[in-house]
Amino acid sequence: MKVSVRFQFTLLLLCCVTFAGPIAGAASPGTIDELRQSFTVDGEPVPPNVFRDMGDGNLADSGSIIVTIDVKAATGSNLYADPIRRNGAWVVQSRIAPGDKSPSEEEAYRYIGMTANKLLVVATSYSGGGTGVFYSLHILTAEPAPAFDSEGKRYERLNLTTIRSVALGDRWNGDVRIDGNKVVVTTTGGLPAGQLREPSTMTIKAERP
């Protein structure tokens, strides 16, 4: 039986489409690459309140106590079930107490990106319900970690660990950018929180301990 050249070409094209691998550069859902690229897990943003628990909400201590969170388990969990919304480049999570109209607590972050040595940079803000809005800069590692779930099945955690946090101040206003393995923080002038601030630039080296 003779087979036309057109039929052979069509069959070859269908095989290429069927067995083609993932698009180059695209991150698979639920992987460490997705977290590093877009700061999402299975397409959902990392809950902002993980930063509240990693030190933003603890203004009484000078350093973080909880430093690592499995964001794969945290995303979509009951622990971080407060509503999440986007406000421009910021991801915001608010908690409103029963009977209140305004949030009693609000955490937000803006994912700046990944440094050349694969550290993640995030600017955050936290308000405990008062007039203060406290900004911080977090430099983090993001690594997969093998573990077992409650049924004893193998499970890959996505561990987010803060290795350095820098307080930017109450009602800080400015910009953060990455320059290779450095983080450049530019603070604008003004009168936030009633305190005169001169414009300034701070450069922080992003490095692993």
Image (cartoon, rainbow, N blue to C red):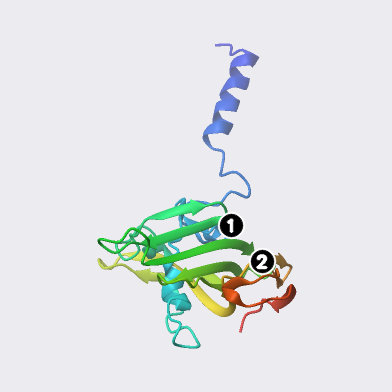
- Who is closer to the viewer here, 142 or 205? 205
Residue drawn at the location 58% of the way across and 57% of the way down: 37
Please, is residue 187 above or below residue 2 in the view?
Answer: below
Residue drawn at the location 55% of the way across and 58% of the way down: 33
- Who is closer to the viewer here, 82 or 145? 82
- Give left or right: position of 47 versus 24: left
Q: Earlier in the sequence, mark 2 or mark 1?
A: 1
- Who is closer to the viewer here, 113 or 168? 168
Q: Around disc 1, counting alpha carbons within 10 Å, would you say few (fewer than 14), some (14 to 19), or many (20 or more)?
A: some
- Give left or right: position of 76 versus 173: left
Residue flagged by tag 1: what amino acid is it?
Answer: Gln
Residue under numbered circle 2 = 174
Q: In this orientation, does residue 145 appear? A: no
Quarter of the C terminus within the rendering: bottom right
Q: Are marks 2 and 1 in contact (CB under 8 Å)?
A: no
Query: Residue 37 shows which numbered tag?
Result: 1
Please, is residue 159 above or below residue 47 in the view?
Answer: below
Please, is residue 123 above or below residue 162 in the view?
Answer: above
Q: Tell me which corner region of the image, top left, top right, bottom left or bottom right, holds residue 195.
A: bottom right
Residue flagged by tag 2: what amino acid is it?
Answer: Gly
- Who is closer to the viewer here, 8 or 21? 21
Rounded to the nearest angstrom, the CA distance separating label 2 from label 1 is 23 Å
Q: Position of residue 130 (x, y in %)?
A: 42, 72
Quarter of the N terminus within the rendering: top right
Residue found farthest to the front? 194
Query: Residue 148 shows which numbered tag?
Result: none
Q: Tell me which corner region of the image, top left, top right, bottom left or bottom right, holds residue 163.
A: bottom right
